[in-house]
Amino acid sequence: MMHEKELTAVKDKFLPLEELKNNQNEIISVLEKSKDEVISFEHAYLRNCIDKTKKCAEYFKWSYYPLSNKTERSNTFFCKNHHLCLICAQRRNVIKSNEWSNKINALLKVNKLLQVSHLILTIKNKKNIDEAYEVLIKYKGKITKIARSKKYEFNKILGYVGSIEFTKSENGWHGHIHMILLHTENLNSLKLHREWGKISDAAHYIELIDTKSSENQLTYIKNLCKYVSKPSQFSAQKNNIHELNLKIEFFIMCRKKHARLLFSGGLLRGLDKEPNYEKIDLATPRYEGIAIFKNKKYQYRQLAA
C-alpha cells in the first residue's frame, strides 16, 4: 500500500483539475438554469456538447511511480470541446505550448542566427463575430501572398505559428492575430505596420516584440507559446449571463465556420495540427488507483496490487 505522503502527492497533482472541474460545473449549471437568456441554447449540437462537457473528466485512473516520483492520469473521458470546455481548453493549451516551445528551441540550437519575435495584428471592430473571423482569415491569406515577394518586410519571416483570438466590448467584436516569428534578419516594425495597413484597410494596431531583450529567452519563449496557443476567453463567470452568451456565440461560430484558429508555416509548418494525446510510458514499479468526482471533490481509491 502507498504511504499517506505518497497519496497526498497524487491528490496535490490533480488539484488544478479539480478546481477547473468545479468552475466548469458552475458555468454549466448557469447555462442549464438560464435557457431563455442564453443564446441558441436549443441548438441541438450545442445541447449535445453541453451534455458531454458535464461528463468531462468525471472519472480517471491514476498511476504513481515511486522511483521517479511521477504521477500519470489515464482512462479519462475528455469531451474535446475546447471552445466551450475549460478543462479541454487548458489541456490543449499545455500540450500545444510545450510542442511549440520544444520545436522552436530545437531550431535555435541548430541555427544560432535565428531570432524569435512576437507579432500582434488587429483589425477594426466588427458588429458580429462571423464577420470578424471572415475578415481575419482574408487578411491572413493576403499576408501569406505578399510574403512570397522580396520587396515586402513579411518576406523576412522564415517560419511562424500563430492563433486568431477574439474579445468583445461595447464597440463590437475585436479580432486579433498573434504570431510567433522566426527570422534571421532584423524586422522593421514601421514597414510591417505599413504593409499591414495596406492589407487591412487602415489597421487598428500592430506590435512587434523582440525576445532577444528577455533575460531568460527559453522561459520567455515557453510563456509566449502558452499565451499564443490559448483559446479566446470571455471571463465566463458563473453569474454573468452576458459573458456566457459571448462564450456560446463564439462556440457556435467556430462550429458553423469550421474555424481553424491556429495556423503555421515555413520552418514551423505543421504545428497548428490538433495535439497528439499519446500516453507516456514511465518506469515501473507503480501504484494504481481511481478518482471519481463527487460532491465537488475527487474521491481517491487505491487499487489492489
Image (tube, rainbow, N blue to C red):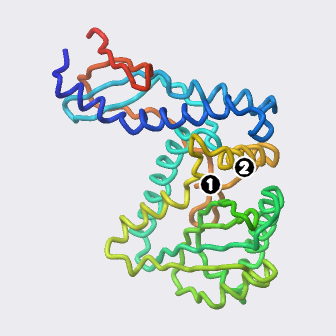
Callout count: 2
Query: What label sits on residue 232 in the rendered view?
Result: 1
Q: Going by the image, does 106 lie left or right of 69?
A: right
Q: Residues within 10 Å of mark 2 (few under 14, many from 20)?
A: many
Against 245, residue 277 (above or below) is above
Q: In which quadrant of the rendered view does residue 163 lie?
A: bottom right
Q: In which quadrant of the rendered view does residue 50 lie?
A: top right
Q: Going by the image, does 100 lie left or right of 215?
A: right
Choose the circle earlier in sequence order: 2 or 1: 1
Q: Nearer the viewer, residue 111 or 169?
A: 169
Which residue corresponds to the image point at 60% horizontal and 67% vertical from the top-left? 178
| Mark 1: amino acid | Ser
Q: Going by the image, does 204 lie left or right of 28?
A: right
Q: CA distance from mark 2 to mark 1?
A: 9 Å
Q: Secondary structure at mark 2?
A: helix
Which residue corresponds to the image point at 81% horizontal and 33% vertical from the top-left? 43
Marks 2/1 in contact by CB < 8 Å: the verdict is yes
| Mark 2: amino acid | Phe
Q: Quadrant of the C terminus?
A: top left
x and y, in percent, of residue 270 in the image: 61, 55
x and y, in percent, of residue 35 in the image: 75, 32
Q: Secondary structure at mark 1?
A: loop
Which residue corresponds to the image point at 71% horizontal and 65% vertical from the top-left? 174
x and y, in percent, of residue 296 in the image: 43, 26
Q: Residues within 10 Å of mark 1 (few under 14, many from 20)?
A: some
Query: On the image, numbered disc 2 is attached to which residue?
Result: 250
Q: Nearer the viewer, residue 229 or 296?
A: 296
